[in-house]
Amino acid sequence: MIPSVVESYENQDGQDLGVPWYTDYGLLYYRTDLLEKYNFSEPSSEGWTYDELYEIAITVQTGERAEGDESFDGFVWMGDSYEGRLNTHTPRVMSWLSSGTTGRVRAKVMKKK
C-alpha cells in the first residue's frame, strides 16, 4: 500500500480511522528503447512534467513517423468520456468534498511538503 494513501485515513493525531476498500492508481508505461534511441532519460523519482512528457512524445512520434510508421502515436491515454471514468472518480471526489474533512486533510498534506 502506498503510505500517503494509508495516511489519508488517519486523523490529526495519527490514529487510523479506516483503510481503503480499493484504490485506483494512475500509471504511465513507456518504452525505454525509444527513450534511449531519442536520447531521453527515464524519469526521476519525481517523474516528468507535462511539458517534458509532451516534448518526449512529439520527438519520438516525429522520428518514428519519419522512419515510415505513419500511425505511430507518441502518447495515448484513456481520456475519452465514458461511463467508467465518471463512475470511478467523480463520486469519490464529491463524497470527499462534502464530507467536511477536506480542510483537515489539506492541512495535513500541506504540512508534509
Image (cartoon, rainbow, N blue to C red):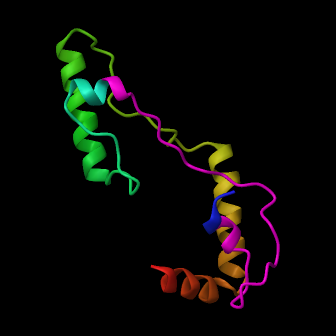
Q: Position of residue 11 (x, y in %)?
A: 73, 86
Q: What span is colored magenta in the figure?
A: 5-33
Q: Position of residue 49 (x, y in %)?
A: 31, 54
Q: Quadrant of residue 99?
A: bottom right
Q: Is residue 75 left or right of residue 84?
A: left
Q: Which residue: 26% across, 28% down? A: 36
Q: Which residue: 47% across, 41% down? A: 28
Above or below — where is 39 with respect to 95?
above
Q: Which residue: 19% across, 11% down? A: 67
Q: Position of residue 32 (x, y in %)?
A: 36, 29
In-front residue for pair 40/76: 40
Above or below — where is 65 with respect to 92?
above
Q: Is residue 9 magenta?
A: yes
Q: Main secondary structure of the magenta part?
A: loop
Q: Is residue 57 left or right of residue 62?
A: right
In-front residue for pair 80/15: 15
In-front residue for pair 30/85: 30
Which quadrant of the rendered structure holds the C terminus? Answer: bottom left
Q: Is residue 32 left or right of residue 97?
A: left
Q: Is residue 109 magenta?
A: no
Q: Which residue: 55% across, 44% down? A: 81
Q: Position of residue 27 (x, y in %)?
A: 53, 44
